[in-house]
Every structure is written in C-alpha cells, then in structure tokens.
Amino acid sequence: TQVITVQDKKAPVLSEAPADVTVECNAVPVAATLTATDNCDAAPVVTYKEVRTDGVCPSTYTLTRTWTATDACSNSASKTQVIKVQDTTAPVLSEAPADVTVECNAVPVAATLTATDNCDAAPVVTYKEVRTDGACPSNYTLTRIWTATDACSNSSSKTQVITVQDKKAPVLSEAPADVTVE
C-alpha cells in the first residue's frame, strides 16, 4: 500500500503591482488589473480593494490599493500600491483689466474675475482695492487685487493699477457782458 497525501501549501503568484507614486489630484491613475498563477489551481481568484485615507484638504489624500490572489485551498498572496494624491497647482484666474490712467470722473467699475482649478470645482475669488492718495484729493492710485484660492489653500492673484488724475480745469458759468456805466 502506498498513501500519497496531496497538499497545496503554496500561495498563488501575483503579477507585479504598479509602483508607488505621488500624483496631482487630477492625474490619479486607473487601477491596474493584476493576474495570478498557481501551482495547483488553474484559476486563482484575484480581488481588489482600495482604501482612501484623507489628508489635510479634500484634494490631498492617500490611496492604498491591494490585490489579493487566493487559490482553492485558501492560500493567498497580496501586492500593494500606495498613491499619494496632492494638490499643488494654484487656480487659474481670468484676465484682469489692463492698467489704466483715467480722469477722476471716469473711474471704471471693478471687473468680476472667475477662476478654474485642476481639482476644486469652485475656487473662491476674493477682491481687494487699496487707495493710495496723491498730491490732491482727485489724484490717487487704486490697486485692485483679485485672488483665487482652492480648497487646499493654493492661490494665484491678478492686479490692476488705476491712476486717477484731475487734469481738467473747472468750467465757469458765463461772466456778465462788458458794460459802460455812469
């Protein structure tokens, strides 16, 4: 009599997982499809799991991707990929109006700028105006600053400088006509 005990103690062999990477939030790679071979099982099952660990802002986080191959005898092997997702790109503001020199009665209304971002659907645009007085009350400079900030505190700014001046003389009403009087 010969008794042959057959055992499967070897785990399946998984194909290589992608390397760990650090990427911008708009460039997260699609999960790879890993395959497995086994010494006894013709078709080991490969499962995939992704775990997100949030960071300091919505567009900064870590993805841990794990593939596990399991054969019919419950032997398993795993491979992992860690993807560090970051947002280091500032929003892009629409163009600010050009710098301009105007008369004191023709100061333009401030423009409304908009912004787009690679990760944040609605970056916040703030506006600030600083007045620097000149030699007289009607001569001054306005510095207008628009700043776009995304959810991860990346920001960009655009500036417009308006030089305001009073170069027109006052207009007098008509003087009385010349007369000869006693």
Image: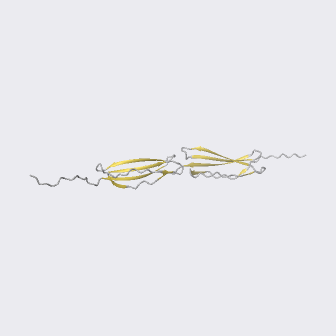
Give the image location of residue 141, x and y in percent: 34, 51
Q: Is residue 43 left or right of residue 29?
A: right
170 or 164: nearer the eye? 170
Of residues 98 and 14, the one drawn nearer to the viewer in this rendering? 98
Query: Please, is residue 47 above or below residue 101 in the view?
Result: above
Total tally of numbered discs in the picture: 0
> Which coloring applies here?
secondary structure
Q: Nearer the viewer, residue 137 or 87?
A: 137
Q: Is residue 20 left or right of residue 135?
A: right
- Outermost right residue: 1
Q: Residue at x 34, y 54 (%)?
A: 102
Name the residue at 45% across, 49% down.
147
Q: Residue at x 47, y 51 (%)?
A: 114
Name the side, left or right, on which 149 lies relative to 21.
Answer: left
Location of residue 50 in the rendering, given as x and y in whole percent from the top left corner: 64, 46
Where residue 1 sits in the image (x, y, percent)?
A: 91, 46
Nearer to the camera, 7 or 65: 65
**Of all residues shown, which one is farthest toward the left?**
182
Q: Position of residue 91 (x, y in %)?
A: 49, 51
Q: Residue at x 59, y 46 (%)?
A: 62
